[in-house]
Amino acid sequence: MRCIDVFNGDADGLCSLRQIRLAEPAESLLVTGTKRDIALLDRVEAGAGDSVTVLDVSLERNRQGLLRLLERGARVRYFDHHCAGQVPAYPGLEAVIDPSEGVCTSVLVDRYLQGRHRIWAVVGAFGDNLDETALALGAGLALGAAELEALRDLGRSLNYNAYGESESDLLVAPEALYRTLALYDEPLGFISGSDLPRRLDAARRADLEAALAQRARWSREGASLYVLPDAPWSRRVHGTFANHLAAVHRGRAHAVLAPTTGGTYVVSVRAPAGEGIGAEEFCRRFSTGGGRRTAAGIDRLPPEQLAEFQERFAEAFE
């Protein structure tokens, strides 16, 4: 019997897995990648007797890979907060899926484990830009203001590290980052005991400063659109920059585009909570788009669709 952990390489995926493996210690094969490396189940070979835990990757985008594993007899636990579509009905599948606002996969795992390692869920929620959720989770943990701020910075830095076209764009490969993080039972110990959080934080802040120096390509009262330069830092920072814009201008929608080495654009979209079109609904109008209500993206936007994207974005959010 093999144990296989499949997880998004961002803060939510990392912190979800850390909760699971603290509660259920096991030697496992790790399958992960950049934040945009979503079709991870295509890389998994498992069958009867094998146990697969999937964390924070879209079921809709992994449906065929999931069905293949289930039909081969693997047992799969699936935790995710993205739009899933119809969940397959298989006796070997345990699906914990909730796309509600204010929920991330770390929160779903926290519920599943009845809060046993909640402090990691706080980090995951901060990393997913769910500050209110993170603060609510942390309220019962007797954390001081300085500790909460340290957890916020850690979540944002872990999330930042997952952005990039390939692992060569990242400061640390997600699997290596998890193996270092997994040496610590609590995130505050990771912060004080490893130099990785400080390195990630410094790189995140430097890239964000570069993004803040850019002017919007298009801006109106209800929305703004940025196209960043063709550079590795742009491919790293576009999601973090979009989160920053959403936090500073909560009532507005934001789109941040960064050129890829393949000649397309990777797109991060943030939409305000409440009524009206959501980020996920908007991004799904494009072939490689998806995500959730307030935060979504497009993996590959051809350059010839840039003008169309801007027009549709203005119509949807202006």
Image (cartoon, rainbow, N blue to C red):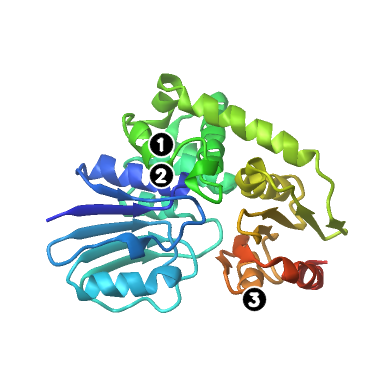
Q: Which residue is mark 1?
A: 177
Q: Which residue is mark 3?
A: 285
What is the secondary structure assignment of the residue under circle 2?
helix
- Give the residue displayed 77% in from the left and 53% down from the top: 226
Q: Residues within 10 Å of mark 2 (few under 14, many from 20)?
A: many
User: Which sits in the foreground, 56 or 204?
Assistant: 204
Q: Which residue is mark 2?
A: 14
- Give the residue displayed 41% in from the left and 79% down from the top: 86
Q: Are marks 2 and 3 in contact (CB under 8 Å)?
A: no
- Give the residue displayed 46% in from the left and 22% down from the top: 195
Res 290 seen here: yes
Q: Residues within 10 Å of mark 3 (few under 14, many from 20)?
A: few
Res 115 seen here: no
- Give the residue displayed 38% in from the left and 73% down from the top: 63
The quarter holding residue 181 reads top left
Give coordinates of residue 245: x percent, y percent.
73, 48
Which mark sits nearer the N-terminus, 2 or 3?
2
Kind of residue at disc 1 = Leu
Residue 110, label in figure: none
